[in-house]
Image: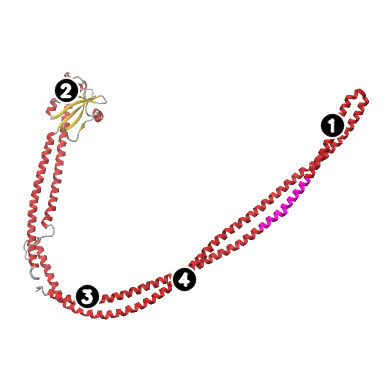
């Protein structure tokens, strides 16, 4: 019975990729050959165009080209140039031949050798700009390195500078070489390469099919022999007899060696199947005893697990109590730290108060001394008022003497009669003035006495104020200093106590924390032990079940050994 493959056959798997590979190789070789031929023929066309342009530029008279102007088509020079250019165009296969000149801005046609109605007259503007041809007008040759296919045909353009007899560039020669024959040759070459590629592919495919068919014939022969071997009802004594002389014969020899190896294995299975059956019986008996021992171990481990769980619960309670103690001590430590910070602030403020009191006492003392000096100076200056009293007394004595003199003058004037009347008037006025001065002096004396009395009272008040500053104010500052010093000492003692309390609370906190960590570690260890005992108990229970399963499997193995022995007996081994 012939069987079909599940996917592609070996023939398809060989022919398809190899055909694709051959196709790709032929295409690559064809493209490469065409590119080399194309580049070579284009290079030949460019060289022919360059050669034709150079010949044409050599035979053209540069002096006549320099004389071309619009409207000179009927001149002898123009006709001479036209005849020469048409002769060159016809002999060298040039499609278009023309001269060009420029005014520095645009490019214009000179002599156009075209025989058709499209011939350009002198002065017609050229379609290419001056910037594109500036290098050629400067004396450089320009040759296109490709074939330009357009409505005017397949052309290779060359531009040669035209030089007159004086060596000046008077224009350029435009040569459009006809490369249509090259394009046609390239097209026919491409067709030939395509046909050769197709023929090579067909030949390669045919040869590949013949080779694959020969290989498949040998494979089918091996397949048929193996099929007979498989359906020979377990006869391992049959051998493949193939004498093709190639790899198929090697495959058949290897299959025969494999059959011999399988035959040896089956003989070993037949000998060991009985031993396997006896061994499984012994395993079943021993497993029953092990199962009983494991059950005892499982019961003991369950009791240990219950005891460890009680221990773990007790440690959890202890850990909870230590945790609450730790929280309380932590709060106390935080409060101590806060109190220490507050006492530090109070100590700082007490120092500031004491320093401010010292500075204030010093400033008050200096101000009191300055005030005492200033008041004493002012009192000394105010004593000058007493001199006013002395001066007023002198004025009064002077006014009395003046009155006496005025009186004596009046008496002498009266004795003199008419001659002393004027002197009497003066003496009378002097007397009046002396009386007024005496009255003013009296008033000044009264004012000076009031001023002296006021100055004496001011001096007495100043002495009282200075005494108050020296006794009362300074005494208050001294008490303030004593109080601030005592406050600072008290705060310093409290600060030392708070620091000591904070350090002690921190030490207690660390100790409780170590206790807490130790209890946690013990609790964790107990928990791990509980888990381990639980796992051992579970493993023991599971092991008991597995032992039971192993006993069942051993029974099954005994049955399998018997069945295996029966199956081996079906083969013909000798």
What is the crowding at mark 4: few (fewer than 14 residues within 10 Å), some, or many (at least 20)? few
Label 1 vs label 2: CA separation? Answer: 150 Å
Precedes in sequence: disc 1 or disc 4: 4
Q: Which residue is mark 3?
A: 553
Residue highlighted by disc 2: 81
Determine whether label 1 and label 2 are within 8 Å by CB: no
Label 4 residue SS? helix
Is residue 387 in sight in this rendering? Answer: no
Count of picture labels: 4
On the picture, is 195 further left or further right than 446?
Answer: left
- Would you place residue 411 above or below residue 531 in this image? above
- Residue name at image x 42 percent, y 70 percent: 521
Residue 528: x and y in percent read 37, 71
Which comes sooner in the sequence, label 3 or label 1? 1
| Residue that carries the numbered disc 1 in the rendered image | 433
Residue 406, image quadrant: top right
Q: x%, y% of residue 395?
A: 84, 36
Q: Main secondary structure of the magenta part?
A: helix
Is tag 3's residue or tag 4's residue first in the polypeptide sequence? 4
What whole-number distance in Å separates the C-alpha atoms at marks 2 and 3? Answer: 116 Å
Foreground tag (3 vs 1): 1
Instruction: Point out the stretch of residues depicted in magenta.
Output: 455-481
Task: Tell me which numbered mark, 2 or 3, is placed earlier along the sequence.
Answer: 2
Q: Secondary structure at mark 2?
A: helix
Q: CA distance from mark 3 to mark 1?
A: 164 Å
Question: Element type at marker 1?
Answer: helix
- Which residue is the site of mark 4? 321
Q: CA distance from mark 4 to mark 2?
A: 126 Å
């Amino acid at each position: 019975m012939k069987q079909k493959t599940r996917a592609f056959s070996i023939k398809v798997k060989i022919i398809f990729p190899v055909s694709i590979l051959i196709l790709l190789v032929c295409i690559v070789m064809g493209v490469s050959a065409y590119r080399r031929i194309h580049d070579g023929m284009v290079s030949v066309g460019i060289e022919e165009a360059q050669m034709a342009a150079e010949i044409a530029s050599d035979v053209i008279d540069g002096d006549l080209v320099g004389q071309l102007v619009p409207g000179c088509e009927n001149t002898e020079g123009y006709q001479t140039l036209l005849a020469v250019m048409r002769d060159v165009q016809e002999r060298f296969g040039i499609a278009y031949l023309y001269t060009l000149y420029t005014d520095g801005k645009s490019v214009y046609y000179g002599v156009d050798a075209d025989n058709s109605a499209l011939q350009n007259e002198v002065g017609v503007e050229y379609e290419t700009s001056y910037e594109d041809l500036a290098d050629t007008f400067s004396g450089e040759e320009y040759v296109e390195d490709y074939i330009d296919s357009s409505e005017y045909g397949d052309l290779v353009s060359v531009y040669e500078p035209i030089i007159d007899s004086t060596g000046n560039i008077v224009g350029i020669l435009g040569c459009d070489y006809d490369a249509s024959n090259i394009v046609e040759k390239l097209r026919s070459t491409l067709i030939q390469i395509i046909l050769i590629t197709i023929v090579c592919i067909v030949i390669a495919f045919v040869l590949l099919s013949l080779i694959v068919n020969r290989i498949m014939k040998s494979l089918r022969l091996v397949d048929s022999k193996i099929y007979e071997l498989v359906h020979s009802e377990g006869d391992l004594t049959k051998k493949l007899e193939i004498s093709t002389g190639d790899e198929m014969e090697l495959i058949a020899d290897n299959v025969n060696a494999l059959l011999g190896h399988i035959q040896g294995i089956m003989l070993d299975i037949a000998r060991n199947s009985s031993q396997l059956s006896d061994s499984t019986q012994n395993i079943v008996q021993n497993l029953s005893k092990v199962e009983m021992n494991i059950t005892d171990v499982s019961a003991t481990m369950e009791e240990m697990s219950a005891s460890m769980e009680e221990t773990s619960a007790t440690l959890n309670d202890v850990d909870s109590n230590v945790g609450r103690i730790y929280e309380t001590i932590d709060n106390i430590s935080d409060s101590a730290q806060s109190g220490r910070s507050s006492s530090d602030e109070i100590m700082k403020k007490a120092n500031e108060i004491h320093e401010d009191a010292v500075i204030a006492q010093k400033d008050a003392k200096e101000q009191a001394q300055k005030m005492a000096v200033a008041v004493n100076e002012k009192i000394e200056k105010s004593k000058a008022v007493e001199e006013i009293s002395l001066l007023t007394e002198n004025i009064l004595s002077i006014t009395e003497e003046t009155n006496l003199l005025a009186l004596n003058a009046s008496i002498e004037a009266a004795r003199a009669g008419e001659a002393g009347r004027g002197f009497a008037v003066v003496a009378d006025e002097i007397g009046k003035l002396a009386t007024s001065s005496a009255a003013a002096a009296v008033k000044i004396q009264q004012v000076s006495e009031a001023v002296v009395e006021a100055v004496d009272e001011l001096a007495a008040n100043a002495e009282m104020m200075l005494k108050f500053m020296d006794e009362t104010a300074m005494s208050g500052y001294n008490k303030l200093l004593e109080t601030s010093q005592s406050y600072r000492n008290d705060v310093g003692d409290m600060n030392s106590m708070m620091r000591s309390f904070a350090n002690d609370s921190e030490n207690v906190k660390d100790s409780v924390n170590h206790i807490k960590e130790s209890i946690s570690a013990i609790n964790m260890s107990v928990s791990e032990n509980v888990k381990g005992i639980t796992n051992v108990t579970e493993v023991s229970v599971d092991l008991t079940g597995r032992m039971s399963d192993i006993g069942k499997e051993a029974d099954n193995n005994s049955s399998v050994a018997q069945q295996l022995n029966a199956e081996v007996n079906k083969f013909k081994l000798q």
